[in-house]
Image: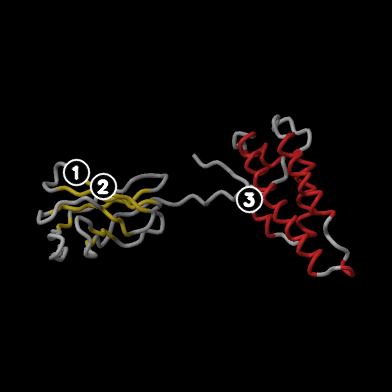
Amino acid sequence: MYFSRLKRSFINYPDAKFIDFINGVIQGCTDNSGLPNIASPLANFKTSFDKYVASIPPRNLRNTVNTAIKNENRAEANLEGILLAAFVEYDSRLNEAIMKSSNFETVDKPQAKGLVGLPKNVSLASNGINQMMMVSCDTDPNATLYNVRVSTDEVNWQWFGANNSRTVKVTDLPNNVKLFVQMRLENAHRYSPWSNSVTGVIGVPDVVMSIHN
């Protein structure tokens, strides 16, 4: 299940925008019944935030020394803001409505993907590492996970691998044995069927034989 979480992009806001944003967060977190344990971390954050605001020099009096002090205090306020956001997530139990009531910004939910297709153009490769092969197929725009299984008889599947990109590394494979390899695609909606088998052989460590169909 997807849970909304809070953005930390406020740490990159320029000073004026950061101050306006954080004042809204302080207002949202203060006496918030959905965040019953927020008082202590909020107080810690307000201390660092007030220190930072007080250290901002007037524009006509800025120099390298007071600007460096301001930047150091801003870095501390950024850190305390990150910690406060994490505590809001924890104290709200990731309840989206409560998190939004803190006036932190929530991460956008990802768009739902369509159904995955079938694995296409499954291929095997050896990069010279003993007992390992790289298995790949064409990219599917809806796949969030690419799964691989390997067998010596197409009945008992003993080795597995997965990756969120189209190339999957499978390790601890036997040398000099004909291997049957299949792939399938996955996302939140479904799995694809397993592909037809592609076969290959891994050689001994000092003579790595080509993986082949």
What residue would you read off at disc 2? 160
Q: Residue at x 81, y 49 (%)?
A: 50
Q: Residue furthest front?
A: 65
Q: CA distance from mark 2 to mark 3?
A: 35 Å
Q: Which kind of residue does numbered mark 2 sit on?
A: Phe
Identify which residue, 155 or 207, lies in the foreground. Answer: 207
Work out which quarter of the rendered image holds the C terminus and state it: bottom left
* On screen, residue 99 above or below 13: above
How many numbered discs sit on the rendered protein?
Answer: 3
Q: Position of residue 130 (x, y in %)?
A: 20, 58
Contact (Cβ within 8 Å) of mark 1 with mark 2: yes
Direction from residue 185 to residue 194 in the image, left or right: left
Residue type marked 3: Lys
Q: Position of residue 79 (x, y in %)?
A: 67, 50
Q: Secondary structure at mark 2?
A: strand
Residue linked to disc 1: 157
Tell me which corner region of the image, top left, top right, bottom left or bottom right, holds residue 211.
bottom left
Q: Of label 3 and label 1, which has the lower sequence position?
A: 3
Place of residue 63 in the rendered image (x, y in percent of width and height, measured from the top left): 82, 69
Depicted 201 relative to depicted 193: above or below: below
Q: Which residue is mark 3?
A: 7
